[in-house]
Image (cartoon, rainbow, N blue to C red):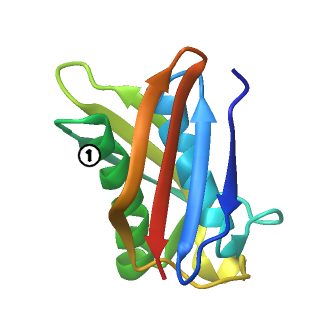
Amino acid sequence: MQPGHRSVPHTADARIEAWAATREACVAEAVTAMVETFADTSAARPTDSASFEVTADTDEDLLVAVLDEVVYLLDTADVIPLATRVEPALEEGYDVHFEVTDIGEVELVGAVPKAVSLHGLRFEQGPEGWTCAVTLDV
């Protein structure tokens, strides 16, 4: 399965879908889809990085935790992820690494998400790989 993502119409918020061969790559695609709902990053270059660990009971918890971290970084550090890497941690959970740039280095093209909604959340493995769908509160 070729990885990919897209925005889909939603009445008041933003809705994204992502797909990839692995759970981790699907989460990374979801981050890219999320960022593309509100920012044009085509001319931006990474200026820093941010890493964190996630321990999640379910695949949905993993997805929400990573997307919540994007919102947190926007709110507290004024940075935006340009690239995402998610890998299984050595002992438990996942290591997440963002290549980031200052929010002032990108063109805002939409409303910045304030939260990840649990309503309509979907993250599942199918015969061709992993898919997810998420609504973002804006």
User: 14 left or right of 106?
Assistant: left
On screen, residue 108 above or below 47 = below
On screen, residue 96 above or below 104 = above
On screen, residue 37 above or below 51 = below
Point out residue 49 in the picture as x, y percentages from the top left corner.
Answer: 49, 53
Query: Residue drawn 68% across and 32% down?
Result: 3
Q: Can residue 82 be seen in this view?
A: no
Query: Residue drawn 72% across and 60% down?
Result: 45
Q: Is residue 22 visible?
A: yes
Query: Residue drawn 36% across and 67% down?
Result: 117
State the residue in front, 107 or 115. Answer: 115
| Mark 1 residue type | Asp
On screen, residue 127 above or below 51 = above
**Crowd tier of the residue under label 1, counting other residues whose Cα lies within 10 Å: few below 14, some 14–19, many 20 or above:** some
Which quadrant is the N terminus positioned in? Answer: top right
Report the number of numbered marks: 1
State the residue in front, 32 or 116. Answer: 116
Point out residue 123 in the picture as x, y percentages from the top left corner.
Answer: 42, 39
Secondary structure beneath dot 1 equals helix
Point out residue 99 in the picture as x, y percentages from the top left corner.
Answer: 56, 51
Residue sitting at the far right: 43
Point out residue 126 in the picture as x, y percentages from the top left corner.
Answer: 51, 21
Query: Residue drawn 56% across and 64% down?
Result: 15
User: 101 left or right of 57?
Assistant: right
Tell me which corner region of the image, top left, top right, bottom left or bottom right, holds residue 18: top right
User: 129 left or right of 134?
Assistant: right
**Which residue in the protein does label 1 denote?**
61
